[in-house]
Image (cartoon, rainbow, N blue to C red):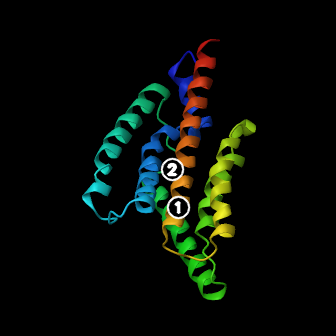
Amino acid sequence: MRTPAEAAHFTREYSQLRGLEWAPASAFFAWLFFVHAFTSWPPTSTRVLWPVIPVVVVSVIIYRHLNRTYGVVRFFSAGQGIAIVMTALAAFLILQIISQAAFRIDVTGLFFGLMPLRAALNRPFRRHWHWLVPAAVAFLQLIVIPHQTQTRAISAWWGVYWTACTMARLWDHHLLVRSFDNGRAE
């Protein structure tokens, strides 16, 4: 890319490749679930929650770096983003309540599986098959542990899910850098 306009167009077309922004948060969730699965520390312990500070600091640094390097693109306002998240959360809670009452099945795996599945299938050039790994881990939760339980096994399962999401986000960043460098070499 020779001009900032080309970089902005590239970022607009490949906005989902900015996965590095969310990699620290995914790694933090993996940390929380693995700590719960393999230690006896309480979830509200300072020993468990201390990584929040470096995660926030690193996320801000990454966000600024990506904006400086690849450009800033806004698809919707903060209010629209909050509305989308709240609608998805409400739909999830309603579906969870209905499924618990009618079938006694936990649909958390379905909800968390649809997000990476959408990421894998709804991208230009379909180069994002790596998102199928976290989707498969989440969908398998429905089969392996169908009932909502708070065991160490389910915590380890979700730790694997968040680790797979972190790796997919890092791979997205690799694709972003590789694509940007290919455009720069022209």
Please give the name of the residue rendered at 69% of the width and 68% of the height, measured from the top-left corner. 143
Return the residue nearer the eye: 181 or 11.
181
Q: Which mark is residue 84?
A: 1
Whether pointer 1 and pointer 2 mark residues with C-beta atoms closer than 8 Å, the reply is yes
Q: Quadrant of residue 38?
A: bottom left
Residue 98's place in the image compared with 109, above or below, is below
Q: Residue at x 57, y 72 (%)?
A: 91
| Residue lying at 51% horizontally and 68% vertically, measured from the top left | 89
Task: Give the labeled residue for mark 2.
Answer: 76
Q: Can you see residue 133?
A: yes
Quarter containing the N terminus = top right
Mark 1 to mark 2 CA distance (whole Å): 10 Å
Q: Amino acid at mark 1?
A: Ile
Question: Vertically, is 5 above or below 42?
Answer: above
Residue 9 visible in this rendered orientation of the protein: no
Q: Position of residue 26 (x, y in %)?
A: 47, 49
* In the depicted structure, whether residue 119 falls above or below residue 79: above
Q: Position of residue 175 (x, y in %)?
A: 61, 30
Which amino acid type corresponds to the residue marked 2 in the rendered image? Answer: Phe
In the image, farthest residue toward the front: 39
In the rendered structure, which disc, 1 or 2, sits on the residue that comes first in sequence? 2
Asked whether 7 or 89 is in front, the reply is: 89
Q: Position of residue 141 (x, y in %)?
A: 63, 65
Q: Within 10 Å of the Cα at label 1, are there few (<14), some (14-19), or many (20+) other Cα atoms?
A: few
Quadrant holding the C terminus = top right
